[in-house]
Image (cartoon, helix red, strand yellow):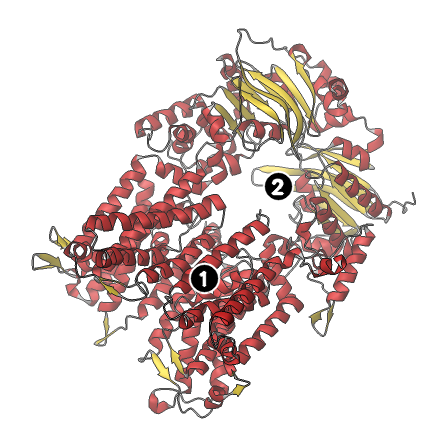
Amino acid sequence: MPRVAEYELVELRGIVKTFPGVRALDGVDFTLRAGEVHALMGENGAGKSTLIKVLTGVYPRDGGTMTLDATEIHPRTPLDAQRLGIATVYQEVNLIPELTVAENLSIGREPRRLGLIDWGTVKRRGKEMMARLDLDLDVTLPVRSYSIALQQMVAIARAIDQEARVLVLDEPTSSLDAAECDQLFSVMYRLRDQGLGIVFVSHFLDQVYAVSDRLTVLRNGRLVGEFETSKLPRLELVSKMIGKDAEQVEAMDHAPKARPAGDHPVVAKATALSRRHAVSGVDLEVRGGEVLGLAGLLGSGRSETARLLFGIDTPDTGTIEINGQAVTTHNPRTAIRNRIAFTPEDRKDAGIIPDLSVRENIVLALQGRRGWLRRIPFHEQQALADQYIKALNIATPDADKPVGQLSGGNQQKVILGRWLAMQPRLLMLDEPTRGIDVGAKAEIEQLIAELCSEGMALLFISSELEEVARDSHRVIVLRDRKQVGELSGEDIRLDSIMSIIASGQEAAAHA
Amino acid sequence: MTDLIHRLRPKPQHVPLVATAAVFILLYAVACIRYEGFASWFQATSLIADNAPLGLAAIGMTFVILSGGIDLSVGAVIALSSIFLASCLVPPDQGGAGMHAGVAIPLTLVGGTAFGAVMGAVIRVFKLPPFLVTLAGMFLVRGLALVLTEQKRISIIGVESFDPLVDFLVFDFNLPAIVFIFATLLAVAVAKYTRFGRTTYAIGGNEDSANLMGLPVGSTTVKIYALSSLCAAAGGVLHAIGSQSGDASVGYLLELDAIAAVVIGGTLLTGGYGYVIGTFLGLLILAVITVIPTYEGDLNAWWTRIVIGVLLLAFILLQRVAQPRKT
Amino acid sequence: MPEALKKLLWPLAALGVLLLFNTAMNPAFFSITISDGRLTGSLVDVLDRATPVILLALGMTLVIATAGVDLSVGAVMAMAGSLAAMLLVDMQAHLSAVIVLTLGVCALAGLWNGVLVSIVGIQPIVATLILMVAGRGIAQLMTDGQIIPIDSSPGFAFLGGGTFLGLPFTITLAVSAVVLTIVVIRFTALGLFIESVGGNETASRYAGLSVRGVRLSVYTFTGLCAGLAGLIYASDITAADANYAGLYLELDAILAVVLGGTSLMGGRFYLAGSVVGALIIQTLNTTILMTEINGASVPVEYNLVIKALVVFVVCLLQSETVKQMIMRRRAVHD
């Protein structure tokens, strides 16, 4: 493969970016060479997206230097960055779906004759631009008539048209299937061989190992290191991402959790649960009095599994049984009637009703189950609210405070209170500890243990593998949207989870 | 043969337009067969002439709706500009300003354009829903139209510089009809061949993307509302020409008919998709539906509104089926 | 509820200023006299005339609280008047049957909007536009496009013109509708559900609320309110006027709701605020009618100009840009 001589195209040194109360980037270095695919890795809150946004002009940096071809640059807007030669293609494709491919490729810079758009040239240039990516498609059809993968190609073609030197691909593969990914990768190789520097952000380890030449790992806003992809074992990559050395992990003392005493019935059971672009082949069951952990990296299918169980999404194939009964119509209402509860990952968009008070947010699910006619009397609402404010140690002056004004941790506790008020049999917690302070984290972990000992079934999802390992009786490991392993009892150790995530080892055993 | 069929089959993006054209042709054919005299040249030209003010407003509205907005002020702008023009033209002894038509008409159009530009700027700068801003605009303009003169209706008869416009006739097309047809052609070209037109589609298609693509979203928004008000003001001028009068109470609920013409013409009410020529066809459909009751002696004229409502529903549902849900 | 009271403060203050202005211009504004066993005066008049908009605003408040809007209420008012006229005049139906049937049909019209919004999934502005266009046609169809005088039924005339407890009966109707609505909304869980759906639809669905059911019921209720408003209007003018009944009143209703402090984005709603908003609009109308400048009365048409300015100011107060500007100004001063 003919490769253009590699040189340092972009250099970021000591980049600092702070938001009120958070240091999102703390002296991060990043180097991109011409003619390489460079993966940017890290878990939630690592600072990947902030770094991308600094690079592409969405945020101005608060400190550090950034050079392109050894010239210091200060992009102010994405447009500014694009003019400098830094092009970005986002996960949600930024095109105009109703307009044709050709037009999307040239809108804003259409060739004109006598002040009028020259459509013949627009079409011809469109075809040429797609040909540069080795794609031959009808450029006179609207963009929306093509698959997401092809739309992404169009976005890439547009992005690199203006003499781009750097192409940033932010999670481009999250909604592509395997064949579509291959198509994207061949385009990436092509562009790399033309001398572009490509920044590739993805949660899929296989893809990162398949396409990237080098990778940079971030954690908690700091640089962990820069590595040659082929020389970094997967296990080491995973341990660098989650911040534990392999030896350190093995040395950690785990008090293995015994299977809880007492014979509790199975609350929920899923068999061969699959949904396109979500998960495939998930088998799980969870009993009262046990915590089932779902482990895996971001995008591995953890939340998707919980969404299927709660009836937010419908499975394409597979069955769900609740309390021993096969579920036919499944939506959040029926799930709640079966006393299943779910705290979603995106607290702001899907959890709290920000304008409503703490009290109203707490009674909402219970009231929803009772129906509109049987209103919970005010004093009972107040009593419930007070009970959970006290039990969960929610920091609020009173129950009338709008939830939107509380801190993240307290918002999370309010949602927990909402579900506990309806006394669920199964409580599914998706990233309950994300973005909340250490004290609140400990409280939530303790609560999980207490609820479990009272006989509740819990499904626990967290990016902090340590938490999953510490709090679960059994752990199901997901990787690239597939169930790849299950651990229980003494086998639940950080290193065993990590090695399954890294290698997908048990996948062979399962299949 | 199959190749020919293949080539004749409309592209998916043209299906709603073809549906509109089919409805119009069907409606017109049925009317021609059913009603004596409907197929006449005179009837055809008056269909266009009678609806020229509405037609112009609908053309402006097409751009607004394509951009994902709405303009509720067009009916009021037609009323104000017609009575404003009338009071400019009428000689001072009848309470007017006695201006020459060559001055009064441009003045009316400039005033209309400026008003629209202000609405567009308010929508853009204060990030307010177009629905609310143009609603305030409607109240304001309707109020101004009513308080401008003591008389609510001013006849423009015997104004020397104006009469030639009223008497103008080519092949039975009067001036309003001709202006409307030319305005349609011009608007088709603007929508298809100018950056302003394409940016309008892009804003309606996905405003965030349009911003990220570096398109001039702000200035285009202002221009879109300016264009809509310009069209409505021109509609007011045409009304004055067609009826030889200015009328402060004309155009009540006309904004609804304009929106209906646009939607029946196949334009997506959420923006981003549609064609000016579709609006022209939509307007012709409205025109035929409106005139049918005069032929159908015992048919109640109010079926018109119901039929328009049904057509609206049909086209909105068609769009709902044909277009994927916007995310 | 201190929050609700705080929200009521601004609209009440605006109403107060308007009333004071009226007293300054016309000292007799507050005077109320008794003639023919009925209290008369400007204040009574304001309440009487505000009734249709108050009723519309009740329904509109709930629709707007679910982050929707209903443009068809004016047309539904016209339908109500025409239907009542048809039943009373043409069919000589019994008054109670007329009222029940009319309100039922109007509730169905509202349900139609609700179905389009919550089941078919059309944006509220677009969905209710259909009935806004067609509804007036249906109304005109029922009356053959004529203005039908309704003078045969004293009972019907009582709705909009009768005297009850020394006051126009409309006031009793308006007060009972407001009280009943507030009681039903606040003493069941409906209010919570509506605010929850408007505040965060996804979270409400995840909490097990029937988002669809909530939407269907608020649009149906709005249709019912519009029906009652239409009956009162027809009774007041003792005729069904399909052309002008409720013309542009949907806009007044939306304005009343926004004036009352409910955000067009949905969420928290303030029924009492909307009522005050409707009173502000009617007082404005009356003020313009009664104000004299240099001995000449102000033309009624100024009404619209002033209303436009009010809408504009209210719009600006709701604008995020303006809020941010004020915040920044404050931050600088701190």
Q: Nearer the viewer, residue A172 or B162?
A: B162
> Residue at label 2?
A18
Whole-percent x, y for residue A156 in the image: 74, 50
- Front-most of residues A244 and B117: B117
Which image quadrant is residue B93 in?
Answer: bottom left
Residue C178 seen from this side? yes
Kindly report the distance in space between the C-alpha atoms of the residues bearing marks 1 and 2: 57 Å
A65 sits to left or right of C331: right
Residue C275 visible, this orientation:
no
Quadrant of the rendered image containing residue B202 = bottom right
> Where is the N terminus of chain C found, in terms of image quarters?
top left
Q: In the image, what residue occupies the spot 51% across and 78% down?
A: B40
Give the x, y percent position of residue A168: 74, 45
Provide the secondary structure element on which disc 1 rests.
Answer: helix
Near-viewer residue (C9 or B40): B40
Q: Residue furthest right?
A: A2
Amino acid identity at mark 1: Ile
Label 1 vs label 2, nearer the camera: 1
Q: Amino acid at mark 2?
A: Thr
- Neighbor class of circle 1 (other Cα within 10 Å; few <14, some 14-19, many 20+) is many
- Residue A312, compared with residue A493, is above or below; it is below
> Would you name the residue on which mark 1 appears?
B308
Q: Residues within 10 Å of mark 2 (few under 14, many from 20)?
A: some
Circle count: 2
Q: Chain of mark 2?
A: A
Residue B269 at x, y = what percent? Answer: 52, 57
Q: Position of residue A198 (x, y in %)?
A: 78, 44
> Who's the residue at 50% across and 46% down the image?
C121
Say which quarter of the image contains residue C299: bottom left
